[in-house]
Amino acid sequence: MIVLQIAILPKLKNTQNNLKTLLPTTAVAVAVAADPGLRFRQKVRYLQFLRVNPTKALHKNPNLRSAPISTLLSVTQCLSSMGVELASAGRILDMYPQLLTADPYADIYPIFDFLINVVRIPFPDIRKAIIRCPRLLVSDPDTQLRPAFQFLTELGFSGSNRLTAQTTMLLVSSVEFTLMPKIDFLVGLGFAYDEVRNMVLRSPGLLTFSLENNYVPKVEYFLKEMNGDLVEIKRFPQYFSFSLEKKIKPRHRLLMEHGFSMPLSDMLKVSDGEFNARLIERRLQMVEIRSS
């Protein structure tokens, strides 16, 4: 009976029906309760239905072995109540198996409450915020989210610049070890604090980039190889969002080969086709000048 019940799961039409159907009938529940092997098998099949790797989940969350399937169902139902469909819930639970045995009312709903009532993320956007940054669901509101929110608010993420579903990922960053070091690095380059503040408000992604793998090598290349002026980075902070090896270096070298220069925004924002077209146009202009 259990095998049949799990086998029809893919044919169920919606999340609520899925969850209701997974709950065993009274007769089946009695049989399952009396057999630890059946209980375990039922959980494994449910994990497989969610496309959660059972081996990884059990390794990372040993409590899963003894937890009743009703615990797993309550977690997926909690996510469903916030608009997260089962397919997305499965991806999230596979990333963070510790959530599979979480208490929704003690561990998950307080996070939703913080996002809605403190950060002021509209309810319809909660799903977007969670799918964009599932790590929110394993971040403590008091020790992690609230300090980051206070720091970001003081930095200027308020009013028209307030955090949105696209930028709530900043809340999972450590103020001391992630956010402040990036602010300090940019200030250390010679920018005033207010200039850095305006840069990160325009490009919040600046606070997500690695110092070691992003900022340092890109600044070094810009200053040493491109002989750039930091004022240009202030005007175009998106420079840090482009790949050094795949875009910045190749395009700069092409410009150098032909003796041309471009503002960072013109060099990087356009597609490869548009960049090559501009390069050809510059070359034709040079030919015309020389022949006139």
Image (cartoon, rainbow, N blue to C red):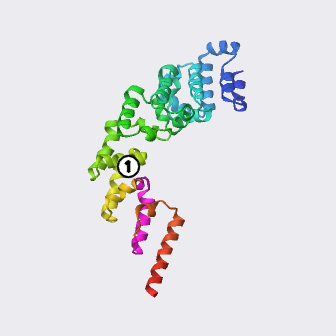
Give the residue at x 52% y 62%: 271
> Image check: 101 left or right of 208?
right
SS class of the residue under badge 1?
Answer: helix
Residue 106 lies, in percent from the top left, at: 48, 20
Residue bearing the label numbered 1: 199
Name the residue nearer the viewer: 46 or 204: 204
> Image check: 147 left or right of 135?
left
* Vertical relation: 267 (above or below) 210: below
Displayed quadrant of residue 289: bottom left
Name the residue nearer the viewer: 193 or 226: 193
Crowd class of label 1 (few under 14; some 14 to 19; many from 20; radius 10 Å): some
State yes or no: residue 136 in magenta. no
* Vertical relation: 233 (above or below) 4: below
The residue at the far bottom in this view is: 292
Residue 46 lies, in percent from the top left, at: 62, 27
Give the extent of the magenta segment: 238-260
Characterize the magenta stretch by its predominant secondary structure. helix
* Vertical relation: 83 (above or below) 231: above
Give the residue at x 67% y 18%: 24
* Vertical relation: 284 (above or below) 23: below
Q: Amino acid at mark 1?
A: Met
Residue 262 lies, in percent from the top left, at: 41, 67
